[in-house]
Image: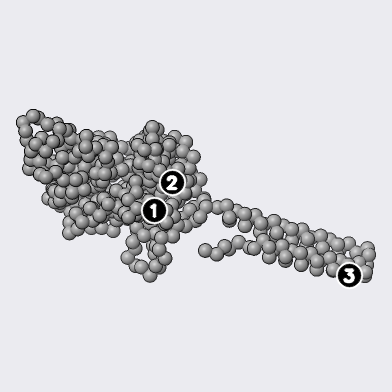
């Protein structure tokens, strides 16, 4: 992109030429009248103007060179695209943002480890200066008051792991800014929930790591099939049974947003040797035992139709794509960190997330492949937040998360999940009858 700032070298050459012309004019006038003061004053004024112009040009050049890159281009913009693809765009820097534009660190629902402003993360406000700009259209911040008015007498359920809670908290804090009369409760097994009383709008978060019911399993000594194969302990995952925390959610909520993924590629939680994932169907082990990715397919094959069958008439069903992690130099338990201060550029994104590189964060795109296959032909709509989020290595709590390791998985709040909710609301407005 060509610079629009003046060229200091050209300006200096013009300055010298103007001053030389002024000097010759002064010399000519002095021959005519040595006592003439008006010509001297004219030359002095002209010289001062030249010097001031040169100073301004150098200042603009220096400021332009030091400012952050304003855009991170992915693909050429197609202004003729009438059907906007919100997920294809770039991050634009807005230096005029000096404070959180939606809500601040005083929102009490923000989990302590995600409150980057309160935890004094050095770029906590800088994170908020980046705005997602889709090609060919805009994704404006949703209006919380208008949202409350439009979705009166509606219940919205977020079902999934802590990344869905990350998004849930963002939505709550945005709405809480404009409506303070709130009832806190836990509808149908939810981890947490709120009703905005004036509008009878309920939002709730149902925590579930795998969607399916699971728990510890140990050999009983009865010589069953798993024991005969040498298994002594692990985790039992019933692929055809929903976890109780959300089993009643489809029949309660009008809008549901699901996610799963992080726990399926988590050897530190489900060690393949010491505590493997052992899948059961119809109450009996799946034999031969299958790996986690095949187990994910089985769970989705049962949970998707379960939700469709149990959902309320006219319910809107969404599945959110995988939220990317940004560990560099190792995984979370191997000293990995995320110390970036600006969004990544395209080449860096591909290096971190390309499947062919088999890197630390490879599960991001792997999970999405499984989701795409499993949701094809269903009534679920996909909320694709992955691509826009892959750029935001700067937006994690990192060392400010209050853990013994860098948190490069969750997101600062306020932060990126606000944009997720802008996207979510844009989809709701488009698809709601």
Mark 2 or mark 3, earlier in chain = 3
Q: Is residue 138 above or below residue 396?
A: below
Is 396 left or right of 207, judged from the image as shown?
Answer: right
Write down the residue under mark 2: 394
Q: Position of residue 202 (x, y in %)?
A: 26, 42
CB-based contact (under 8 Å), mark 3 and mark 1: no
Residue 331 lies in quadrant? top left
Residue 351: image tag: 1
How many residues crowd mark 1 within 10 Å: few (<14), some (14–19), many (20+)? few
Mark 3 or mark 1, earlier in chain = 3
For the residues labelled 2 and 1, the Cα–Cα distance comes to 16 Å
Write down the residue under mark 3: 28
Identified at 12% across, 31% down, the residue is: 219
Residue 312: image tag: none
Is 225 left or right of 38, judged from the image as shown?
Answer: left
Query: Mark 2 or 3, which is nearer the eye?
Result: 2
CB-based contact (under 8 Å), mark 2 and mark 1: no
Mark 2 or mark 1, earlier in chain = 1
Is 265 left or right of 45, judged from the image as shown?
Answer: left
Q: Position of residue 191 (x, y in %)?
A: 24, 36
Identified at 16% across, 33% down, the residue is: 233
Query: Mark 3 or 1, which is nearer the eye?
Result: 1
For the residues labelled 2 and 3, the Cα–Cα distance comes to 63 Å
Q: Position of residue 330 (x, y in %)?
A: 37, 42
Residue sitting farthest toward the top: 221
Q: Judging from the image, what secondary structure is the residue with disc 2 in?
A: helix
Q: Is residue 205 above or below residue 428?
A: above
Q: Viewer-proximal residue, 105 or 51? A: 51
């Amino acid at each position: 992109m060509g610079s629009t700032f003046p060229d200091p070298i050209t300006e200096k050459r013009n300055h010298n030429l103007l001053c030389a012309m002024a000097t010759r004019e002064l010399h000519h006038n002095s021959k005519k009248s040595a006592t003439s003061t008006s010509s001297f004053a004219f030359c002095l004024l002209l010289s001062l103007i030249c010097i001031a112009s040169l100073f301004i040009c150098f200042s603009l050049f220096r400021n332009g060179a030091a400012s952050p890159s304003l855009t991170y281009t992915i693909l050429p913009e197609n202004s003729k695209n009438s059907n906007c693809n919100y997920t294809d765009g770039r991050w634009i820097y807005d230096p005029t943002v000096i404070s959180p534009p939606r809500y601040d660190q005083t929102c009490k629902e923000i989990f302590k480890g995600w409150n980057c402003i309160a935890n004094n993360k050095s770029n906590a406000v800088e994170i908020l200066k980046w705005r997602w700009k889709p090609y060919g259209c805009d994704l404006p911040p949703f209006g919380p008051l208008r949202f409350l008015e439009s979705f009166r007498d509606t219940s919205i359920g977020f079902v999934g792991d802590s990344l869905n809670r990350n998004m849930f908290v963002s939505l709550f804090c945005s709405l809480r800014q404009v409506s303070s009369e709130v009832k806190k409760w836990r509808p149908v097994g939810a981890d947490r929930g709120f009703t905005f009383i004036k509008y009878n709008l309920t939002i709730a978060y149902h925590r579930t790591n795998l969607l399916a019911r699971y728990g510890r399993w140990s050999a009983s000594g009865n010589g069953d099939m798993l024991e005969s194969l040498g298994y002594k302990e692990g985790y039992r995952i019933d692929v055809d049974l929903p976890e109780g925390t959300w089993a009643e959610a489809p029949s309660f909520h009008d809008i549901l947003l699901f996610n799963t993924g992080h726990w399926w590629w988590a050897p530190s939680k489900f060690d393949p040797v010491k505590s493997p994932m052992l899948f059961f169907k119809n109450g009996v082990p799946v034999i031969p035992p299958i790996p986690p990715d095949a187990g994910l397919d089985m769970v989705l094959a049962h949970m998707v139709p379960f939700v469709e069958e149990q959902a309320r008439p006219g319910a809107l069903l969404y599945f959110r794509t995988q939220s990317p992690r940004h560990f560099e130099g190792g995984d979370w338990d191997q000293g990995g960190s995320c110390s970036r201060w600006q969004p990544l550029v395209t080449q860096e994104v591909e290096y971190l997330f390309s499947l062919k590189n088999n890197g630390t964060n490879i599960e991001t795109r792997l999970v999405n492949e499984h989701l795409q296959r499993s949701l094809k032909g269903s009534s679920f709509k996909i909320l694709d937040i992955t691509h826009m989020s892959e750029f935001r290595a700067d937006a994690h709590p990192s060392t400010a998360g209050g853990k013994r390791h860098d948190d490069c998985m969750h997101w600062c709040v306020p932060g990126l999940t606000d944009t997720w909710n802008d996207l979510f609301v844009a989809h709701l407005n488009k698809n709601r009858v």
